[in-house]
Image: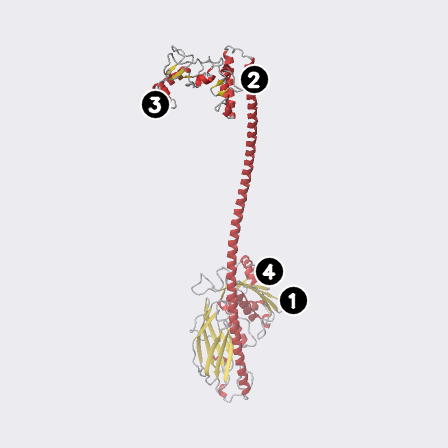
Amino acid sequence: MSSIDVVFEVLPEEGPGDRSASEVCEELQRQLSDPRSTLRTGDFGRYAAQATLSGPGQPGGPTAPDLAWGGPPRGAVGPPEQVTPPPPPPMSRGPAVETVFGGSGGGAAAGGAGPCGVPSPTGVWGPRGPYDLPAESQSGYGGGDWQGPGGAQALSNAELVDKISRYEQQLVRTAASGQEQPPPVSRTRLASAEVEVRALQDKCLHYEHRLEAVERELREAQEALRSYKSKSEQLELKLKDREQLLVHAKEMWMKENVRASKLADSLTSAEDKLADQEKRLSEVADRYDEAQREVRQLQHLMGGGGDAPAGGAGFSAIPAADPNPAMGRPPLSLVDASFSGDMLRGDQPRGTSAGRLDSADLAGGAALPPPIESDTNADRFRRLCILNDAVLYEDELLQIGVKAEYNGREGQFAVFFGNKGSAALQAFTVQYFVREEQLLKLSASPLNQQLDADKQVVQRVSATCVEPFVQPVWLRVQFLLPDTSPRRIQVRFPLVVTKFMVGCELSPAEFFRNWRQQNFVLNEVTAIVHLAARLRGQLVYVARSIVFGGALRLHHGVDTNPDNFVLVARLADAPGDSSKGADALGPDPDRGLSLVRVEVGTGRFTGKARVVVRSSNHVLARALCDCILLQLAEPNTPQSSDATAR
């Protein structure tokens, strides 16, 4: 059995952390004696059990630490063959140890020592190549480090450069230590070394070129990465902008959807109102047809009565010559104007003040207009629009008086019917016609159908203003004369919208602020009227007629022209609902507010007046304008001939 000698060459220490040759020998000796060590348990464990270790300075030991496995071969006489390692290279500062592997019939016999310094045509790693150096050269320049699968050819660029730097440092240290120069080498070895150096330099240059190319590619990749990052950031910003636009578009869509819903609701409301108007129109058409039938019937009756002349106070006339002398005209004082003051409270007119006129003519009973030359029924109706207690109608047979009391939007009436004749009136019936039943509610107590001579009866009537109304209430009285001829009297009942209004005070700034509001401008009603002859004197007569007993408050200093009148009024609140106000006029604080301006003409417009009414409700403005025209125009003349409404 042949033995295997392993020679270790310990390189000199390069730093304080490197071990010396003696420390390496001690560590190997400890592992050989420890069965659980790495050396004993590794691949060479079966050899390490019988191995011996000898180092430099020991008896019989080599110049470098030597590790031998096994004993002499069977049948051998002498000691095992020992291979003497070559001396350490001159550049090392300490003992260098090279490892020598020898085997039975293979390593030392066939291949020689090779790296161990034994001359041989072939090395341990195979046949010697053109770049292999002899043993002396390899020990000096480390040629073995550049060959084999674990040599320089398997190193990376950084490791190769690091190894070259380490060898250069060793050369510098060797030169600095002042040791003797290595012995001169032969020309063959020098040429081989130069070829090897040139090959290494070419390889280093090749790796440097590759390194530069890789660095250039890395820089290009980094530039591309930065470009991609910039594009990514731009795309993210664009995406955020698109998201914001999408959110904005969604909000706009929601708003438009809400607006469309409101428009749809408004359209539905308008259609409902249109349907109501069509219904009212059909009702008016039905009433018109009914009135036409009644007119044709009355014409037939009047045409059939040859002894009954045409004319009279109603649709049928009173006979011109009455055979009964007792039916003469009774005194006008048959029905007292006060109508028995204990019937209703409030004998005096409501709110007789007409603002703040400098003259005291508008206070108290002086609020009445000047005396009227001919006391007609139209004049009586106009007077009752201002007063609450007066005669409404009077002829040779019947006298009708009214006593009223108002509280907010409710009114209580006592209507007196007096028979001025000497004979009883049979089939006496009274009817009240309200054309706008949904706006004005009216109820009356029943009456006896016989009205005795020189007697009067009282009928209780209650009214509630739900919303502003324009059309007046008509009172129709029907009865039979003593000769059984029918008689019908139809007059307007003094129930107008001003009865449910109260005057209010506004500063000039507040007046003009409301005057210029869009809803007030859109609801403006304008009319031009010819003043009655009784009003063409002093302006106080006009002021007395348009304040309606205090229902409209006269304002001074608002209009710069002293001949013009500015009045303000508001629709009264419903009883028990003063906080909510008028239901029909909405929740706005200016509901029911009406602003009036009356311009009295001068110069070539003398005798004319222009009335302008603006209100938050068009129906209220129309009704108030009609009431003012009724007070200013001549009786029995068309009031709307010169009126224009927006």
Rounded to the nearest whole Å, what is the CA distance between mark 3 and mark 4?
Answer: 126 Å
Rounded to the nearest whole Å, what is the CA distance between mark 1 and mark 2?
Answer: 136 Å
Q: From what the image shows, is residue 41 above or below residue 581?
A: above
Q: Residue lying farthest right?
A: 604
Q: Is residue 29 left or right of residue 397?
A: left
Q: Nearer the viewer, residue 455 or 296?
A: 296
Identify the image's colour scheme: rainbow, by chain, secondary structure or one colour.
Answer: secondary structure
Residue 82, horizontal then vertical, whole percent: 41, 13
How many residues crowd around disc 4 within 10 Å: few (fewer than 14), some, or many (20 or more)? few
Q: Amino acid at mark 2?
A: Glu
Q: From what the image shows, is residue 501 above or below residue 418?
A: above
How many residues crowd around disc 3 within 10 Å: few (fewer than 14), some, or many (20 or more)? few
Can you identify the residue that label 3 sits on? 36
Can you identify the residue that label 1 sits on? 603
Q: Amino acid at mark 4?
A: Thr
- N-terminal of the pair, mark 3 or mark 1, is 3
Q: Nearer the viewer, mark 3 or mark 4?
A: 3
Q: Amino acid at mark 1?
A: Gly
Rounded to the nearest whole Å, what is the CA distance between mark 2 and mark 3?
Answer: 48 Å
Tell me the element at label 4: loop
All told, the count of numbered labels is 4
Can you identify the residue that label 4 sits on? 560
Q: Nearer the viewer, residue 43 or 329?
A: 43
Can you identify the residue that label 2 sits on? 194
Q: Nearer the viewer, mark 3 or mark 1?
A: 3
Quarter of the rendering occupied by the N terminus: top left
Tell me the element at label 2: helix
Q: Amino acid at mark 3?
A: Arg
